[in-house]
Amino acid sequence: MEMERLYPLPNPDSQPYWDGLRERRLMLQQCGECGTIRHYPRPVCDHCFSMEVEWVEASRRGTVHSWSESHHPFHPSFKADLPTMFVTVDLEEDVRLVGILRDPEATLRVGLPVEVRFEDAADGAFSIPILVADRSGGS
């Protein structure tokens, strides 16, 4: 018996982020007052405490900060995906993003240039950021 997959539950603060992923765009919040870029989406700027927000498209490039390989699913519906490599990336926009590495040829190391790409859920309900090594020499 196939178990129903868990999906993210967007809220008013995160909806533009999830909409951007479906459009193959990595959208980040930018404070409307001080200009600070922030990620994960939230209602208040950590720098100046403003609630003014704009959305900007990110470069989709960064470098590996850290990683963790998971051998245990957090929910039974993800068991077939194991092992899964979760990578924390320092984006060019000076924020961090966690994504799944989908690059079996990549040799992980701190500082490895990576690019954010997109992967759709099987039913097309949403998209997630995935990571591959940036072989263009870009970061």
Image (tube, rainbow, N blue to C red):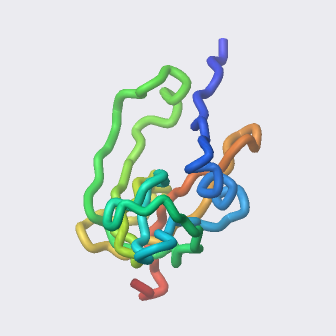
Q: Where is residue 27? Give x, y as percent.
A: 58, 66
Is 135 situated left or right of 120 in this image? left
Compared with residue 116, is residue 3 higher up or lower down, i.e. above or below? Answer: above
Given residues 87 and 126, the one toward you in this image is 126
Q: Residue, x 69% and y 55% (percent of image)? A: 19
Name the residue furthest bottom: 137
Quarter holding residue 139: bottom left
Quadrant housing residue 46: bottom left
**Residue at the far top in the pictured view:** 1
Q: Residue at x 75, y 44 (%)?
A: 124
Q: Count the numbered circles shown.
A: 0
Q: In this view, does 33 lie above or below 83?
A: below
Q: Name the residue: 57% across, 73% down.
A: 56
Q: In this view, does 62 lie to the left or right of 102?
A: left
Instruction: Where is residue 77? Give x, y as percent.
Output: 55, 24
Residue 17: percent from the left, percent from the top?
Answer: 59, 56
Q: Where is residue 118 in the image (x, y as percent from the top left)?
A: 61, 59
In the picture, which quadrant includes the N terminus? top right
Instruction: Name the residue nearer the viewer: 98 or 132.
Output: 98
Q: Is residue 122 positioned above or below 21 on the image? A: above
Nearer to me, 97 or 49: 49
Q: Quadrant of residue 87?
A: bottom left
